[in-house]
Image (cartoon, helix red, strand yellow):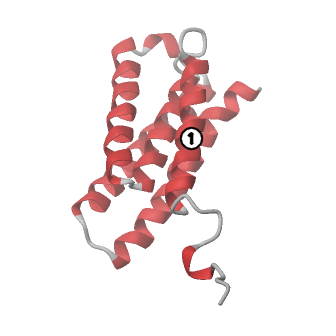
Amino acid sequence: MLLGVIPVLAILLLGFNIHLLVKERRYKKSWISFSMLGLNGLLFVAFTFFLLVYMAGFVTITTIPPFVYWFLIMLGFIIEGMSLYKKYVPGQMTAAAIHLFVVLPTIFSIGIVLLLVAIIELIVAMMNGTGGHPVPRNKQTTTP
């Protein structure tokens, strides 16, 4: 039961990330936000389609070649590396969603490790989103 919820959480995380990227795109027109918006949209459609086909019972996980899953794992690590370097929170959330989605087919090999990596990625994204401070900088009080 819990294992079936993890890909749904990945799809919800991608949907939330698309929402954040659309809001960011209104204010800042950069190629990174445009490319991440396209990648998130593609991943959202692909993951949703795969999950619906899998849940309907038309395909089993083992019919998909393993290099597809390894490609997704490597793509997640590449996106995470670039996003950590730039401190780009939507990229970190995309990498976490990719790793969360790949947990389902790889649960018996490296799925637990990928689940921990996704949790760490989300924690780092939250820390980068707040600037590493629990209180926003403009709200801090100073004593005279």
Extreme residue in the front direction: 144
Q: Would you say 94 lies left or right of 103 here?
A: left
Q: Would you say 143 lies left or right of 32 here?
A: right
Q: Would you say 107 lies left or right of 38 here?
A: right
Q: Quadrant of the C terminus?
A: bottom right
Residue 109 coordinates in the image, percent (x, y) = 55, 9
Residue 93 vertical placement versus 55 (above, below): below
Q: Quadrant of the N terminus?
A: top right
Instruction: Identify the residue at horizontal 54%, vertical 25% (top origin).
Output: 114
Residue 135 coordinates in the image, percent (x, y) = 64, 69
Residue 14 vertical placement versus 101 (above, below): below
Q: Would you say 115 lies left or right of 21 here?
A: right
Instruction: Identify the residue at horizontal 50%, vertical 26% (top origin).
Output: 102
Instruction: Identify the residue at horizontal 41%, vertical 21% (top origin).
Output: 69
Which residue carries the number 1 mark?
10
> For this rendering, which residue is in front, 131 or 57?
131
Give the SS element for disc 1: helix
- Label 1 amino acid? Ala
Residue 90 coordinates in the image, percent (x, y) = 43, 55
> For this rendering, which residue is in front, 39 or 123?
123
Circle count: 1
Instruction: Identify the residue at horizontal 62%, vertical 39% (top origin).
Output: 8
Would you identify the image quadrant in which residue 30 lies? bottom left
Number of residues whose C-alpha sits closer than 10 Å to that of mark 1, classed few (under 14), some (14–19) or many (20 or more):
many
> For this rendering, which residue is in front, 133 or 75?
133
Extreme residue in the bottom direction: 144
Residue 18 coordinates in the image, percent (x, y) = 46, 58
Would you identify the image quadrant in which residue 73 lies? top left
Extreme residue in the right direction: 1
